[in-house]
Amino acid sequence: MIAYEDLPAGRIIPLGEVIVDREDMLDFARRFDPQPFHLDEEAGRNSIFGGLSASGWYTASLWMRRWVDEVLSDSTSQGSPGGRELSWPAPVHPGDRLTFAATVLSARLSKKRPGLGLVEFEGTAKRGDELVYRFVATGMFTSRGAQGA
């Protein structure tokens, strides 16, 4: 089980790869972000994205799924109070192979809640060497010595 102690600053956590599925991407766009360039090939070609492109929130959801599968599902996670940065520097297209990672930027124990660690991390998605998604957020993880950990 991953606990606060396992997440020191500098740790890089590979989260695996995903090939962007066109139908899954379109289903997400229909439900949550129905902008024309997320739904229609021609609208995408006529946009600054050069083709049908994924919603940034879809890309974020792909990252989150990998984070849950690789870290949170077997951890002492207590959720997150939020983040402070979010960017989608390049469009994502159907068939893209995305590689996901998380890098721990800092880790400290809470002053108000003994046994609770605050772990700031950078989440990224890349297509080859090109960054397509980046965010910085804080996760809360109990320490091994905390009650209930």
Image (cartoon, grey):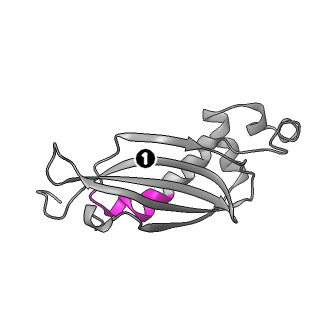
How packed mark 1 is, by other alpha carbons closer than 10 Å (few <14, some 14-19, many 20 or more), is some
Circle 1: element type: strand
Q: Is residue 24 toward the left or the right of residue 82 in the image? A: right
> Which residues fall within the magenta stretch?
66-76
The image position of residue 70, as x and y in percent, is 43, 65
Identify the image quadrant of the N terminus.
Answer: bottom left
Foreground of the two, 94 or 13: 13
Residue topped by disc 1: 137
Where residue 142 sits in the image (x, y, percent)? Answer: 22, 56
What secondary structure predominates along the stretch shown in magenta? helix
Q: Amino acid at mark 1?
A: Ala
Q: Which x, y percent locates residue 82? A: 39, 40
The spot of residue 36 in percent (x, y) is 77, 32
* Residue 73 shown in magenta: yes
Instruction: Pick the residue in front: 120 or 18.
Output: 120
- Residue shown at the point (70%, 45%) measured from the top left: 54
Label count reads 1
Q: Quadrant of residue 87?
A: top right
127 with respect to 114 (left or right): right
Quadrant (top left, top right, bottom left, bottom right) of the C terminus: bottom left
Residue at the top extreme of this rendering: 35
Image quadrant assignment for residue 96:
bottom right
What's the residue at 71%, 50% (across, down)? 92
Looking at the image, which residue sits at the far left? 147
Residue beneath the point at 30% across and 61% down: 75
Image position of 59 (left or right of 105): right
Q: Quadrant of residue 129?
A: bottom right
Q: Is residue 68 magenta?
A: yes
